[in-house]
Image (cartoon, rainbow, N blue to C red):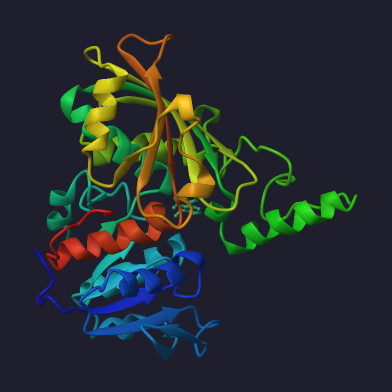
């Protein structure tokens, strides 16, 4: 179903966080056809004012009754809030698009990347899940290749920015960098160890077979979004001291041979993808160039010499925008049947 009209009443839950604030700017940037905008947050943040669509808007407490007059709610307030409030909102006729992992693997909850599986959005029963940031950028890049030549195996290593762990973690990375340069020995708080001048091969907690939760999310979410449980995915997720944009080295085995130039041509025509790949001019995607953008950048496309029918590539995208807020707003655009649900 789509929402009942083309000018929905929209609510943002978690409007004061990094992703929540980006929701607000994206609704404005993309001229989202909304009728009204309500900002909601925890009781602690209620009463604060944020500028949205040129007006000062008071943040109200996110509570079940607050959804009575809301058509679409964009949630980015953490899994606990989503688990508690998304069903309450859905029961009141609101379509929830949730940025947490709370509902992603539920069978009756579509997990949607508009460039990959837009049709799944229509099958919602009140809740649609937005995937993990590292998953989103990888499937935007790999789906167009998979459609031409089915993928059998993905081995991926991520280089994830500090903003993925939230505003406080980003601040810790910046502050620690200053402290270390000044000769101090800072105590970690938001990260398990010092992040400044370091690389941490742990994102989220350890789970089965010594994979982290982030690594398991990448595998399971990719299979669900691409409707391809047969694809083997093994990820190593690493936090690096970059502010915005995640980078990924993906090693992909296809069913049949695929040349790097064929892959470049397919990706150059793919929605939401920009190919930046010219070794002769040292052109490749970099986090500092992807920051603030909505596209997924792909480069370093080359034959993988260790895999049958293999290609290696480097995939970069802004984790707060395409990895979270932009993808969520694109899903909302699908519901309102706005013409082009892509990052362009
Ligand atoms: O660390 C990153 O770069 C991405 C983090 C995502 C994240 C952090 C805390 C909780 C998630 C997520 O989106 O998967 C969650 C969660 O909702 O489980």
Figure quadrant of residue 168: bottom right
Image quadrant assignment for residue 240: top right
Residue 265: image location, x then y, percent: 24, 29
Residue lying at the far front of the rendered structure: 281
The front one of 267 and 121 is: 267
Image coords of residue 108 (percent x, y): 20, 52
For the point 28% across and 49% down, the residue is 106
Nearer to us in this view, 116 or 221: 116
Which residue shows up at 63% across the image and 58% down it?
Answer: 170
Position of the C terminus, as image quadrant, is: bottom left
Q: Is residue 31 above or below residue 195?
A: below
Residue 9 position, x and y percent, is: 23, 81
Task: Point out the image quarter for the N terminus.
Answer: bottom left
State the image coordinates of residue 142 (x, y, percent, origin top left): 29, 33
Tell me if residue 217 comes above or below residue 34 in the rendering.
Answer: above
* Residue 326 visible in this rendered orientation of the protein: yes
Residue at x-position 30% and y-position 12%: 309
- Is 197 left, or right, of 249 in this rendering? right
83 left or right of 93 in image: right
């Amino acid at each position: 179903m789509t929402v009942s009209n083309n000018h929905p009443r929209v609510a943002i839950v978690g409007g004061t966080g990094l992703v929540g604030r980006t929701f607000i700017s994206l609704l404005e940037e993309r001229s989202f056809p909304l009728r009204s905008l309500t900002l909601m947050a925890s009781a602690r943040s209620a009463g604060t004012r944020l500028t949205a669509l040129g007006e000062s808007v008071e943040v109200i407490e996110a509570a079940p009754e607050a959804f009575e007059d809301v058509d679409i709610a964009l949630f980015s307030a953490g899994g606990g809030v989503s688990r508690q409030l998304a069903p309450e909102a859905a029961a009141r006729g609101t379509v929830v698009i949730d940025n947490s992992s709370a509902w992603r693997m539920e069978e009756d909850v579509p997990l949607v990347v508009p460039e990959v599986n837009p049709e799944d959005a229509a099958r919602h029963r009140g809740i649609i899940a937005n995937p993990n940031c590292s998953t989103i950028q990888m499937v935007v890049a790999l789906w167009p290749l998979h459609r031409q030549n089915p993928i059998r195996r993905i081995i991926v290593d991520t280089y994830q920015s500090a903003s993925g762990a939230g505003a406080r973690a980003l601040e810790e990375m910046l502050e620690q960098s200053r402290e270390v340069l000044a000769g101090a020995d800072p105590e970690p708080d938001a990260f398990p160890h010092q992040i400044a001048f370091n690389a941490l091969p742990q994102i989220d907690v350890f789970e089965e077979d010594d994979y982290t939760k982030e690594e398991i999310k990448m595998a399971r979410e990719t299979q669900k979004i691409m409707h391809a449980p047969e694809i083997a995915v093994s990820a190593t997720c690493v936090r690096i001291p970059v502010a915005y944009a995640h980078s990924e080295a993906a090693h992909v085995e296809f069913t049949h041979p695929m040349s790097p130039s064929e892959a470049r041509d397919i990706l150059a025509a793919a929605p939401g993808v920009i190919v930046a790949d010219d070794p002769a001019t040292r052109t490749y995607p970099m986090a500092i160039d992807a920051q603030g953008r909505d596209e997924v950048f792909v480069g370093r496309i080359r034959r993988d010499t260790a895999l049958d029918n293999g290609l290696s590539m480097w995939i970069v995208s802004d984790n707060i925008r395409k990895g979270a807020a932009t993808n969520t707003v694109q899903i909302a655009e699908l519901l309102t049947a706005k013409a082009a649900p892509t990052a362009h």
